[in-house]
Image (tube, helix red, strand yellow):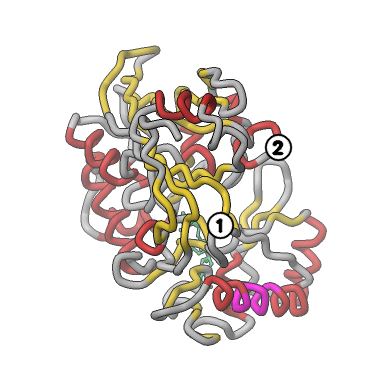
Amino acid sequence: MSPELPVEHDVSLQPFNTFGLPALARRYLRVTDPAQLDCLRTDAALAGLPRFVLGGGSNVLLTRNVAALVLHMAIPGREIVGEEGGAVLVRAGAGEHWHGFVEYTLAQGLGGLENLSLIPGTVGAAPIQNIGAYGLEIKDVFHSLTACDLATGERRTMGAADCRFGYRDSVFKHADGANLVVLDVTFALPRAWQPNLRYAELAHALQDSGMQAPTPRQVSDAVVAIRRRKLPDPAEIGNAGSFFKNPVVTAGQCAALLARFPALVHHAQADGSEKLAAGWLIDQCGWKGKNMGAAGVYPKQALVLVNTGGASGAEVLALAQAIQADVLEKFGVALEPEPVFI
Ligand code: EPU
């Protein structure tokens, strides 16, 4: 084994997944420098192994020990790298803590990321999910990223079109992006910043506190307050944020559901389809605040599954499947999980 690669064995992943689920990594490498990935390709013992790339562990459901080589992305760094078309370009290493990076941009006097405050996870994982909240998605402030093709070692600079961003989706979740590991991400933050108050709850929160012309910091504070009120802090209660995506249905399906359920929460999309609120659907099935074993549905937000203490991944999975079955039976809608299952 290459001396440059400090591969560890049987490492507990419990501290590295926000659900706090128990699982071992049979082989584990903390990647702090992109050069380690080059060594990996030429290491006879490691080169052929399947890999599992782990970021902040806020979007995984670990149901068993991981046989693949776990690459725990910890590449550091944050800097302003230039200016382009009225925007400041800010870059961060894949291993940077997301909210810490948002705080860094605010401290530089830069707005643009504040609606995404307090999202758990790392910078490198943000484009994979195209993380989004309160009327903003990564794709709206994205400039480019550097990825490494694990098969060839090639470094690629990818723009938004290359990343094929969708709702909680990107090329990295599909077969043609499966070999790509994100090394760093660059954001374009506008000099002429305007608050993004498209999300009604955020606009109301700022109005209620008398802020007509909020600063990026004030918007961030409001987002943090809303998130703290509605979502559990993974440091206290294990969870992976929204467990299911909000399902997208046709206008016809939505109309048929509305006829039966007039209170159905739905949002028209630009392409004419309708996005339903999975939290509302789950809530209507009576799951809010219910537990199955040590896995539970968060009492303040039915879209969030929680580890009430000592849960196994199998218990969370069983709860998720029971919820999916009920929502399918009552509404005819299939819920798709957000986290990656192992
Ligand atoms: N609702 C209920 N009962 C519930 C939960 C929600 O009736 O138990 C209703 C709410 O009243 C509201 C609607 O469902 O009318 C939508 O709820 P909310 O505004 O809280 O947002 P969400 O659809 O549950 C999405 C994202 C969150 C993001 C928020 C804010 C997804 C899957 N989730 O949640 O993202 O923070 O909007 O933008 O798109 C995440 O992905 O991990 C995440 C937390």
Q: Is residue 89 above or below residue 185?
A: above
Which residue is drawn at the image coordinates 29% and 40% (left, top)?
A: 102
* Res 310 quadrant in image: bottom left
Q: Secondary structure at mark 2?
A: helix
- Horizontal and vertical percent for residue 276? 64, 61
Q: Position of residue 19 (x, y in %)?
A: 43, 66
Q: Closest to the observer: 158 or 94?
A: 94
Please name the residue shown 52% across and 81% down the image. 288
Task: Please tell me which of labels 1 and 2 falls first in the chain.
Answer: 2
Query: 10 Å neighbourhood of mark 2: few (<14), some, or many (≥20)?
Result: few
Q: Is residue 52 left or right of residue 220?
A: right
Is residue 27 visible in the rendered structure shown here? Answer: yes
Callouts 1 and 2 close, C-beta under 8 Å: no
The residue to which callout 1 is attached is 339
Q: Which amino acid is tagged 1?
A: Pro
Q: Amino acid at mark 2?
A: Ala
Task: Give the quarter of the figure containing the N terminus.
Answer: top left
Residue 112 pos. (x, y %) = 34, 34
**156 or 208: which is nearer to us?**
156
Asked if the beta carbon under badge 2 is closer than 8 A to the nearest atom of ligand 1, the reply is no
Instruction: Report whether the residue tagged 1 is closer than 8 Å to ligand 1.
Output: no
The correct choice, above or below, for 14 with respect to 129 in the image is below
Q: Which residues are magenta?
A: 318-324
Q: Which residue is mark 2?
A: 175
Q: Viewer-nearest of labels 1 and 2?
A: 2
Left or right of 65, for residue 116: left
| x and y percentages locating residue 334 in the rendered image | 73, 65
